[in-house]
Image: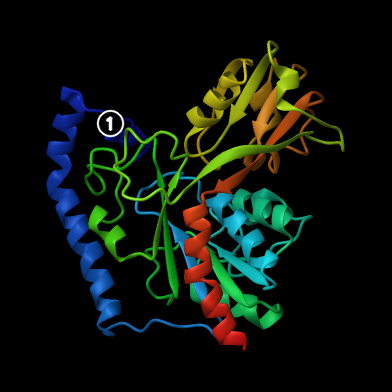
Amino acid sequence: MKSLALYWYRSDFLASLLAGFLLPLSWLYCAVAVSRRKVYQLGLKKSYGAAVPVVVIGNIVVGGSGKTPLLISICEFIKNNGFKPGVVSRGYGGKVKGLKQVHDSDSAELVGDEPLMICQRTGVPVVVGADRVAAVNYLLEHNQCDVVLSDDGLQHYRMQRNVEIAVIDSSRGFGNGFCLPAGPLRERVSRLDEVDIVVYNDAADESSVDMAEDCSYVLKVADVCHLNSEEATRLSSFTGKKVHAVAGIGDPSRFFSQLCDDGIDIVEHAYPDHHAYAQADFSGWEKECIIMTEKDAVKCRQLSLPDAWVVSVQADMSDLLISKLSTKILPLLKKTFN
């Protein structure tokens, strides 16, 4: 699948030829996806609700789209309005069997990198488990939460939801527009007509996506801290300096571009999304200056990297997005708890 992804965002002859060859499988995939959703909509398969509102933050495109920073900002938005959010996650990349509530001291190897990062950044309860319904029930049974945020799970129709938020990477868009395996789509683009909020990540680049509304957010650097100490600095302190840039995220090029835009001379080290780091990954340059994403950092704190720095980002939400969150989510909470 990873090798196919190289062609999803290209328009050359070879990419078109490969997409054409795989189109029958894509049509079958689309038909199954649509049928599966209809089965739940018609009540032929049972879905399960929760005692509190459930908000799904997902996408229709495979690969990273910047969901996690947005989820973190939405957590803060809800907390600032006086409510108590909780999060459920698949825990992709972790080794948990069944259900587990995430703690600050857990390893990313056990619970997954994104759930651990969410827990550490927000302080809200986070439960991981493949069964989203069971994870929601566990979260509510063991914690006092007013609302559940699901990290991904847009296609997990067994879990009823009150609000659907779809995140689109504006720089990559929908690729060639085909469903898997000919293209990157989990569902047809028309699925976006049915979600409550469509959010474009980094909508400063509007050339690749036709956006009817500026419901968006831009990732901005929140802070830069040493990997294993309290020391903090500014990203500008690395300007003109040669550093090793490490990114094991959905779209490493975005992180690398951000560093280059700040005038930093980088050596790029792109790893697969959710990569499990080992000391050998840094062999030969482990003592040199390294900058990595926060998602990578939760898997590198046990390694010997004396000059490693972590860039934390936050989702700076547009006024329209904040307005839509206020009208879609807050009334549900006030109705539930008044």
Give the farthest residue toward the bottom. Answer: 338
Q: Position of residue 5 (x, y in %)?
A: 33, 36
Whether 307 is drawn above or below 330: the answer is above
Q: Amino acid at mark 1?
A: Tyr
Q: Residue furthest right?
A: 230
Look at 53% across and 77% down and name the residue there.
331
The residue that label 1 is drawn on is: 7
Which SS class for mark 1? Answer: helix
Q: Does residue 130 show up?
A: yes
Residue at the (40%, 75%) spot, across then down: 158
Residue 180 coordinates in the image, percent (x, y)? 26, 48
Q: Is residue 56 left or right of residue 123?
A: left
Marks counted in the figure total 1
Left or right placement of residue 226 versus residue 63 in this view? right
Residue 318 image position (x, y, % from top left): 51, 49
Query: Residue 118 is drawn in which quadrant?
Result: bottom right
Q: How is the image coloured?
A: rainbow
Tell me where residue 306 sits by quadrant: top right
Q: Quadrant of residue 23?
A: top left
- Report whether 147 appears left or right of 58: right
Q: Residue at x 32, y 35 (%)?
A: 208
Residue count near mark 1 (Cα–Cα under 10 Å), binned few <14, some 14–19, many ≥20: many
